[in-house]
Amino acid sequence: MKKKLLIIAALLTGLTLRAEEAASSYSVTLDFTYATKYVFRGVELAKQSLQPSVEMAAGPITAGIWTSQPITDNIDNEIDFYVGYGADLGGDWSLDTGVCLYYYPELDTGGGADSTTWEPYVGITGSAGGFSPGLYLYYDLTLEVLTVQGQVGYSVALEPAGASLDFSANIGRVDPKAGSGYTYYSVGASVPFKLSESGTLTLGVNYAHNNISGIDNSHFFGTAGVSIGF
């Protein structure tokens, strides 16, 4: 009888450990963000927008859904589906690659516009002297548009407030196969406040600029979002 009890206890312990390992092998993050403008690669696509998202990570693989829902001007909404894979390159550097599907469910396709486009990407990110540099290459297979973007981040701890001050900057070049390309850049600062073990409130301010003639070139906008991790 004692042997049976010991065997059952061992089995239960093994199942519990496996369950704990499975639970810790993946994570899910929900994010609810409000933006005073939706600016993508230096170009304003919408005014005030709600931008909720959900992302799941399991080891080196991430997958998620991000959406922008304009609340003014009745501009078409956007839903992005993406999956990515990260690989350690040694030291403080890693490879980031994946593909994104851009979907515009309300887009008028009568003039030949595409309601969905596919964009694979590859990038290298790292850490050097407290900075987080990165270089990315994107190519939209549907629109035949090449984008190259360099970026860098830097974070300063705000220990008394239980937060940090995060700076970011990027510069990129967009070159379509047909038509003229353009250059853009942006800078931003954000402060994430820890609300709980799983919740974070992030406030941010941003400035973006492009060199396209005939449209608004400069954009100031702010963001406020709450993320919850599981």
Image: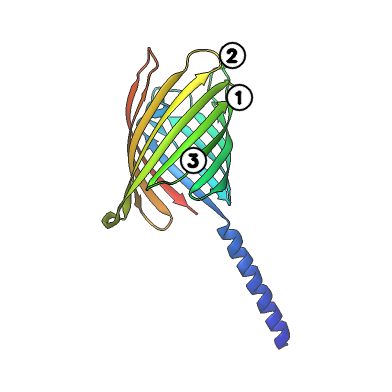
| Relative to 26, residue 8 above or below | below
The quadrant the N terminus occupies is bottom right
Q: Residue at x 38, y 28 (%)?
A: 185
How far across and down, in percent of the image, does residue 209 sit? 35, 24
Query: For mark 3, what is the residue?
Result: 53
Q: Is residue 62 above or below residue 214?
A: below
In the rendered picture of this protein, how many numbered marks are placed on residues?
3
* Residue 123 position (above or below residue 156): above
Q: Which mark is residue 205?
A: none
Q: Residues within 10 Å of mark 3 (few under 14, many from 20)?
A: some
The amino acid sitting under disc 3 is: Ser
Where in the figure is residue 80, as x and y percent of width and height?
Answer: 54, 33
Residue underneath mark 2: 112
Residue of label 1: 141
Dots 3, 1 in contact, CB < 8 A:
no
Whether residue 81 is visible here, answered yes or no, is yes
> Residue 49, how many percent across, how many down?
40, 31
* Mark 1 neighbour density, 10 Å: few (under 14) some (14–19) many (20 or more): few
Residue 46 visible in rendering: no
Q: What residue is rendered at 68% in x and 74% in y?
A: 11
* Residue drawn at the location 58% of the way across and 37% of the way down: 98
Give how far across and how far down residue 75 sits, in percent: 44, 23
Label 2: state its secondary structure: loop
Kindly indicate whether the residue at mark 3 contacts the one at mark 2 (C-beta within 8 angstroms): no
Q: Secondary structure at mark 3?
A: strand
- Relative to residue 148, is residue 5 drawn left or right? right
